Image: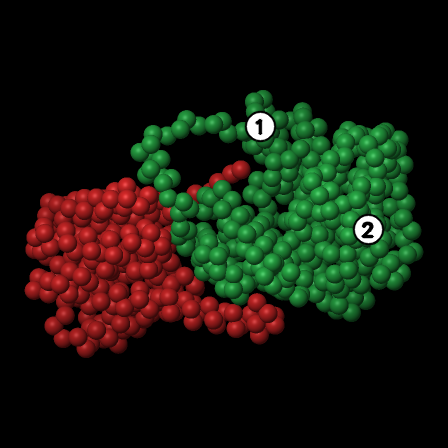
Chain colours: A red, B green
Amino acid sequence: MIRGLWNRETVALMLLAAYLPLALFWLWLGGTGALAQLALAVLVIGIWHLVFMLLRAQAPSLAALTTALAIAMLAPEDLGTFRLVLGVSFGVVMGELVFGGWGRNVVNPAIVALSFLGFGFPAFPWPVFDAPIAWAAIPAALIGVASGAMPAAVLAGAALVATGAVLTGLLPEQVLLAAGIVLVLLVADPVTSAATTLGRWINGALYAGLVTFFAIGWAGAAPVQIAVAAALLTSLAAPLLDEAALALWVAQRRRRHGRT
Amino acid sequence: MVTEEAAVRAPSGRSLHVTPLVREGDMVAKGEAVACMRHAPDVCFVAPIAGQVARLSLLPGRKLSEIVLFREPDGAVRQHDPDQADTTAGLRRLMQGAGLWPWLRRRPFGGMPAHDEKPSAIFVMAADTRPFAPDPRQAIAGREEDFSRGLAALLRLTEGPVIVCQQAGAPLFDRGADEGRIRTITRGARHPQASAGICIHQFFPAGLDAPVWDIHAEDTAALGTLLDNGELPMQRLVHIAGAGLRDARTVRTHPGADLRQLTQRIVLPGPHELISGSPLDGHLSRWLAPRHRQITVLPRETARRRPHWLVSALTQSAGAKPAIPTAALSKAFGGALPAAPFIRALSAGDDETAMKLGVLSLLEEDLALADYVLSETGQLTAQLRGMLGRIRTEFDA
């Protein structure tokens, strides 16, 4: 028998390839500090994957690297080793590994880790991104969509609403840059975003809408904080969006065929 | 091309209790019944070639395994009386007695339809998008009249529509007085667009009390010929392809043909495996299965060295890995149904959600592409078979 390509690790590799431009620009501008942060995140996540492999026979995944990149890029600055290790451990174990590993998780582990760090240590400043890094999110999204690893409808839905918000002047530039990076790194995750086409459009639109809403009404919040909070709420709403889209699809078929 | 040996096998699906009508050593004519169903003696399995019964093997419970025939060069041909098809009951009797019934397949659950079942719709598959599949248009070229007659006969078996799935091109039949019940749908060229299950799911979903049949266009033309001159033609267009061959070729042969003889002169040296059906959904076999129109020859994979224990732990420690919803997975279902929720329902054993999403219209061959895309070795099809079995015992006992 013959076998195709798209198993779990191929998708993880494709996501890594998509994130490569983003990671390279970030490392180039961030220097050794950024590299050390990434190495620490990879090390901690790697250890937890090893622990779950040995204790629960759970195969590790290359998706650990994408999680590490997202956390290293978006975590609050100057946290120190201990706090970062704590946050990464909480996010990876409670967000992904206890559910059975990548592909069975309900929320993105990086979102859990970042929210944990944001709520737990509110005194530390969130990172600010320069325009070149945010521009690198565009090739990342293109590679992701071209290889089929990222849901195109999520990106399209978010782009649609964000364009409207920018044109009406509701979305400041700094928030737009951070929201673009978070969209590519966290929201356009094939596992935890909605799984139906309609659900994905709404998922993307909801994310952009929440970002706009927070940008207007949440005084004193950093752009990355706004984007991460919007990503968390969106990924919690994703199953609901899917359920609604499926109910609609089933109702349509029932009307057309009399059964499903 | 008629092979020196041929076998009569049951169509895939549930194993069937049969009563053999011949003994080893008997001479049979082409098209003569060699076995019939024990609980529905009208439904016969017929000899695809004229010859001598060489071996008759039944499984425990008198289930049909295979009946092997040796060819006799100038054997007789069984003639049926086409006049008995004037009534609907007579048409059914003729189809069942002439051995055409096993070429039909029903959904839900698959397999041959029961002898008295009335379908809600019949799909005639005049398109085949599986890799290396022969073009059904070529198979029925020059037999348009028989095809139209076959369609008209199928129309009498159902009160619903007869739906012809074809690829873009000239119409395959003469649109005459068909009461508007013969519909034509045009499908794309990419697999699984002309997979029977995907078409049925999109245009006329099967239900527990609404069975849908499907039949190949060439078999429909064969039905037309049977109604014309009383003889069921056994020829079918079969494509032989695969990586284990020197060159691919298309031959006209018959069901139950001996794959070894058909591929003997064209295989590459070295070990190989013969698959009846496409490389996606075929199975290892020596004989061409009743509904198959493809033969795939692949080089046999040599047993690899066992990897280091750490590598095994890293890659194979857990059971099945989860499917990640990608564009490739949606395309593997032709966009006909929400792929990720369906796969999740399937792997979680959630029968009710899967039924809502249309599992009753699907069979193993429709999921074979998804299995291939996800690089699984038959997990999805096995899960589907398990789920269909559960639904059958629960709702359709």
Residue B331 falls left or right of residue A168: right
- Tell me the SS state at disc 2: loop
Q: Is residue B327 visible?
A: yes
Q: What's the chain of the residue with tag 1?
A: B
Percent x, y of residue B284: 61, 36
Q: Amino acid at mark 1?
A: His
Percent x, y of residue A202: 37, 69
- Image quadrant in which the C terminus of chain A is located: bottom right
**Same chain check for tags 2 and 1:** yes
Percent x, y of residue B395: 60, 63
Residue B63: quadrant of the picture: top right
Q: Amino acid at mark 2?
A: Pro
Q: Which mark is residue B272?
A: 1
Up the image or down, A253 lies above or below A186; here it is: below
Residue A180 falls left or right of residue B33: left
Which residue: 22% across, 56% down? A91
Looking at this view, is A100 or A136 the one in front? A100
Up the image or down, B123 lies above or below B364; here it is: below
Q: In this view, which residue lies farthest toward the top?
A: B269
Residue A228: quadrant of the picture: bottom left
Return the disc, 2 or 1, that comes first in the chain's sequence: 2
Q: In this view, which residue lies farthest toward the front?
A: B61
Query: Alpha-carbon neighbours of circle 2 within 10 Å: few (<14), some, or many (≥20)?
Result: some
Which residue: 72% across, 62% down? B119
Q: Which mark is residue B15?
A: none
Q: Is residue A130 visible?
A: no
Query: Alpha-carbon neighbours of circle 1 within 10 Å: few (<14), some, or many (≥20)?
Result: some
Residue B296 falls left or right of residue B261: left
Q: Which residue is mark 2?
A: B41
Looking at this view, is B372 or A177 the one in front? B372
